Amino acid sequence: MKITFVGHASILIETGGVRILSDPWWRGPCFGAQWWVYPPPAVDVLKDARPDYIYISHGHHDHLHPGTLAQFSRDTLILVAQSSNMTRFIRDMGFNVIEVGDEDIALGGEGVSCRIIPTYSDDTLMAISDGREVCLNINDALHSAPATVQEALAARLKALYPVIDYVFCGYGTASHFPNCYVIPDKNRAATAAHRQAYFNRQWARLIDRLAPRFGFPFAADVVFLEEDLQWANEPMHNSERPTDAFRKVFPDSRVCVTDIAPGHVIEDGVTRHAELRKPLSMEALRSAYDEQIVRANRYGSVTGEAIDEVARLLQGALDAHREYLMSYEGDYRFLIRFRNSDTGVLVEKRGRQLGLNKIEAGEGRLPDFDVMYTTRLHYLKNSLARRYGDEILFVGSGGIFEYADRRLAGSNLHRELQVLLKKPGKAKLRRYGNSSRSVYKLKRVVKRMLGRKSESLYDLDAWTVYASQ
């Protein structure tokens, strides 16, 4: 079995006369102009190695990238999970799609088989076996999943494959959180490093649990080129590497972990071509991606009619969630600002009054507002109008929340605003689950008395490192 790391979440597996490529992304950005792939993928390896199959793990734009996928011959067979919500879209692009269940299917060649296993939040993983070696492509499927999901899947994989040779596992944060939050006294570089360190250790624990011969971190070759977020690139990539975390946590492990870069090749357990990760340099990035940086910071004009349309969509979201929003016990003033426009939308709650209005936002400054949210108008329009449209904001880091007061960040006040920034779903939001407010509060008091603290991956105060700490 020969495996080439192409870049980000893309690997090329060649075995038994069959070539399987995963999650190709290299032609342009994804999530609008928010994510850019870096280091550049080693696409030259595909010139003489046309894939027979392409595995698409899930629908996030850095895995299902239409601009890149369109470059491939329509004779290439696309592998997705059974009953995948991507099937119709990919077929509409002209490809034949094979839906693979979690039972082995033959891919032709000399005893090559695969299975695709659903994991968590519409994600999947793929296992490839050629009768001699086994490769697991876990991509984003487990490192951000709950511990119970991780343990159940790891146990199942070890039962299916007692000896695992290669594991490619993601370790990226893949979220706007917590780097898209501006808070007084926040140490943003330390916060980004703290968040990344958590996922590095998740990667390390998964590799230890699966105990392959070789473990490789991948699926995190992402940089931000927008000026407001360029600062995050170095602390996310350079503060600690997942392979270093693995060696710290499991110093006696026999697993060979390697921090690979695009173009790295391993075959039959032997490294045929070594490409290792280098620290990210913003100077080098700006030099290599000068044209892309200009594109990432080009916002275009905003018309009054477009703002009116978004205001109507926001009003629709407010009306759909009014009961939920009114159950919040405090008052607030939110300002939604659009890049390249002096007009914004004010969302205000005062007692039993809740509404929104267009205002001139060019001079809008904290502390006139509790939270300001800045985004591109068309990002917000897509988020409000399309299913999964909010991914551009909350996966792709398409907007910035700014708090006036650190204490408000401690209460996660931005969550009230987040409700308004998404297309309303069919399900009715419930603040207290199936309990009344009084019962819900009582349960929380009892849990605190018993010392039971529920950890959240999205508790802003818990994940923020402050300069004064």
Image (tube, helix red, strand yellow):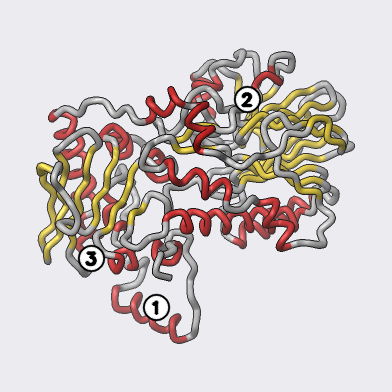
Tag 1 near tag 3, CB within 8 Å: no
Q: Which residue is mark 2?
A: 78
Q: Is residue 118 above or below residue 37?
A: below
User: In the figure, is residue 183 to the left or right of 453?
Assistant: left
Compare marks 3 and 2 and give the one earlier in the sequence: 2
Q: CA distance from mark 2 to mark 1?
A: 47 Å
Q: Position of residue 345 (x, y in %)?
A: 16, 44
User: Where on the picture, by quarter, is residue 84?
Assistant: top right
Question: Crowding at label 1, few (<14), some or many (≥20) Cα neighbours within 10 Å?
Answer: some
Compare marks 1 and 3 and give the one earlier in the sequence: 3
Amino acid type assigned to the residue bearing label 2 in the image: Ile
Q: Out of 150 and 369, give the one closest to the viewer.
A: 369
Marking on residue 124: none
Q: Quadrant of the C terminus?
A: bottom left
Q: Secondary structure at mark 3?
A: loop
- Residue at left offset 40%, top offset 79%: 443
Q: Position of residue 195 (x, y in %)?
A: 51, 56
Question: Crowding at label 3, few (<14), some or many (≥20) Cα neighbours within 10 Å?
Answer: few
Marking on residue 327: 3
Tag 3 near tag 2, CB within 8 Å: no
